[in-house]
Structure formats: structure tokens, C-alpha cells
Amino acid sequence: MKRKIRLASITAALLGLLVMNASAMHIAEGYLPGGWCIAWYAVCIPFVVAGFWAIKKRVSANPKTVTLLAMCGAFAFVLSALKIPSVTGSCSHPTGVGLGAILFGPLVMAVLGLVVLLFQAILLAHGGITTLGANVFSMAIVGPFVSYGIYRLCKKFGVPAAVGVFLAAFLGDLLTYVTTAFEMAFAHNSVGFVESLTTFLGIFAVTQLPLAIAEGLLTVVVFNVLQKYSTTELRDLRVL
Amino acid sequence: MTKSIWKKNVLLIVLVIILAVIPLYLCKDAEFGGADGEAMDAISEIDPSYQSWAEPLLEPKSGEIESLLFALQAAIGAGVVGFVLGRITKGGGEPKAQPEKK
């Protein structure tokens, strides 16, 4: 029975990956010069490789956590499907990677984020294969590391778990987009780096502010339930 | 105790909805296009000579098909999240399902 449930959740998670798509945040196909594309790929490879090991280690240490892992992946799918209007008059969407990073650590999300971005790029023409490295770096590496770091810091200083989760998801989401703005400004700055960075921060980071708050709140919603009903798992994962 | 968690969560979700609705009133004339599209426009201003050098492999044939894929994505994701949360909160004899229900 237990096995059946595990199978069902893995299958469902994989199905989710297949239609994963789209977003208003990723750098579009062909919009970074070749040199930068290669550079960002190179930066990401060690994280992704380490991420595969991290998942393997997590699952072999406690196979029961697979269900939670599947849910973290699914949470990211839902959130990245939600294109929400923002105060700048344009739309963007949350990333949803904060929850997984808090529960399983940032390296695990490097792999999940990569899979998500890969399918988006291939099936839905969002993001791109050439810009995959840069997008993985912002969404699947910087975001999760920020979320994880903030949550750990909050825990260390005795901040209530729900507040820590909110701050972690909020800042992880926001800094993902700040990173995207930097990546764009590094590559396109003939008007001057600072000016270009300001432009891209205005487009990505300001738009993202209310959405990052929304992501923080939604992550707390799920966390509240886990904290109450999955206390043992969270303790095993050293989240609580 | 159980009730308070659901109350809290409903409140949080209402807050999210308010956050999403406010911009519609704040920027009445805005188009609410994607931020990635705006970034492409910004590049053509900053770097007019820059040409995109790659094209997406596949593109959804129309806005309708794209929204179908979006809806599917959200539905499947929400299904999995709901399924797992349902197991966790309902228990039902699974050893993992109800660790410390009080």
C-alpha cells in the first residue's frame, strides 16, 4: 500500500514535469550572447551534479521523504503556472522553489529546478536552451540557497518557524529575479552597467516584489499544515 | 488547534488574492504583459544591434493552447499537492501519515 502511494506520487510528479511551462521571468531563447551562455552553464554544472548526489542521499536515508519531495516539486509547478499582475503593470510568476529548499536543502532544488526549466524551454518556448544555464543559476541555485540560508539563520536566532519560512521564500523569490537582472546587465550594458542594471531591476525585481510576498504567504500555508501533521518528518529533516 | 490552522491559512490565501487584485486598480491602463517581453524590448533599446541568435524549438500554436498547457500544469501540480496533504492530514493507517496528531 505504502509503495503504491509512493509510486502514484512519483508518477504524478513526473506528469507534472511534462507539462511544466512557462514564465514571465526566464531569459528568453537567444537573448544572451554565446559566451555568457557557456559561462552560466559552467557555473551550474557542479551544483547540479552535487544535487543528484544530495537527492540520492536523502532518499536512501529515508525513502518515506519521497512523497514530500514530490509535493515540493508539485508546489513549484503550481506556483510557476500562476502569472499574477503586479504593480508595474506587467505580469510575472512566483518560483515555488523556496519550500523544497527549506525542507530538503538547496542542492536538491538545483536538480528539480533544472528539470522544470528544461521542460519549459523545450515545450512551452519559455526561457530557452541557450539561456538555460543563466536561468538555472538564478532560479534553481541562487533562489534556493538564499531561502535555505535565511531559514537556517532564522532558526538559529529563535525566530518562529512560520516567520522564518515567510522570509526565506520571500527573499529567495526576490533574489532570483535580482539575479536575472544582473545576468541581463552583465551581457547587455552598452549604455553603462549601472544604468542597464537599473533598467533590468525595474523590470524584474520591482515587478516581483508583491509576487514574492505572495509566494512567502503561500509557502507558509503549506508549511503550517506540514508543521502540524508531519512533525516527525520535519524533525527528521531537521527543519524543526 | 486544528481549526486555528485552517483559519490562519484561509486568511493568508485571502491576503494573496488581495495582493493580486490591487495592481488591477493601481494601474488601470497597463497591459499586464509578461516581464520577459519587457526585458526583450529593453535589450533592443540598450543594445540596438543585438540580434537574438536562437529560436525556441517548439512554440504553442496559439494563446488557447498555451493557456491549456498552463491550466494543465496548475491542475496537475495542485492535484499532487492536495493528494499528499490529504494523506498527511487524514492518516488512514499509513505510518508516515499521522506522526503526532493531537
Image (cartoon, coloured by chain):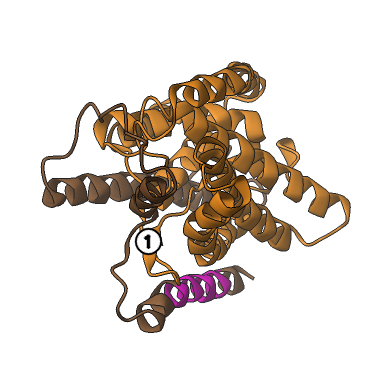
Chain colours: A orange, B brown
Residue at 78%, 46% in the rendered image: A152
Q: Quadrant of the N terminus of chain A?
A: top left
Residue at 61%, 22% in the rendered image: A43
Q: Is residue A213 left or right of residue B72?
A: right
Report the magenta residues as a range. B6-19
- Vertical position of residue A229 compared to residue B76: above or below: below
Question: Residue A15 lies in magenta, yes or no?
Answer: no
What is the crowding at mark 1: few (fewer than 14 residues within 10 Å), some, or many (at least 20)?
Answer: many
Q: Does residue A143 show up?
A: yes
Q: Which residue is mark 1?
A: A91
Q: Is residue A228 left or right of residue B61?
A: right
Between A53 and B59, the one nearer to me in the picture: B59
Give me the chain letter of mark 1. A
Q: Position of residue A221 (x, y in %)?
A: 55, 61
Residue A116 picture quarter: top left
- Magenta: main secondary structure equals helix
Query: Please, what secondary structure does the residue beneath circle 1 have?
Result: strand
Q: Position of residue A174 (x, y in %)?
A: 59, 54
Q: Position of residue B9 (x, y in %)?
A: 53, 69
- Vertical position of residue A159 compared to residue A87: above or below: above
Residue at 11%, 40% in the rendered image: B61
Residue A30 picture quarter: top left
In the image as oriented, which residue stretches furthest toward the right? A157
Between B33 and A11, the one nearer to me in the picture: B33
Residue at 38%, 28% in the rendered image: A118
Q: Is residue A100 left or right of residue A236?
A: left
Count of residue discs? 1
Q: Does residue B82 show up?
A: no
Q: Position of residue B58 (x, y in %)?
A: 20, 30
Between A217 and A205, the one nearer to me in the picture: A205
Three-letter residue code for mark 1: Cys
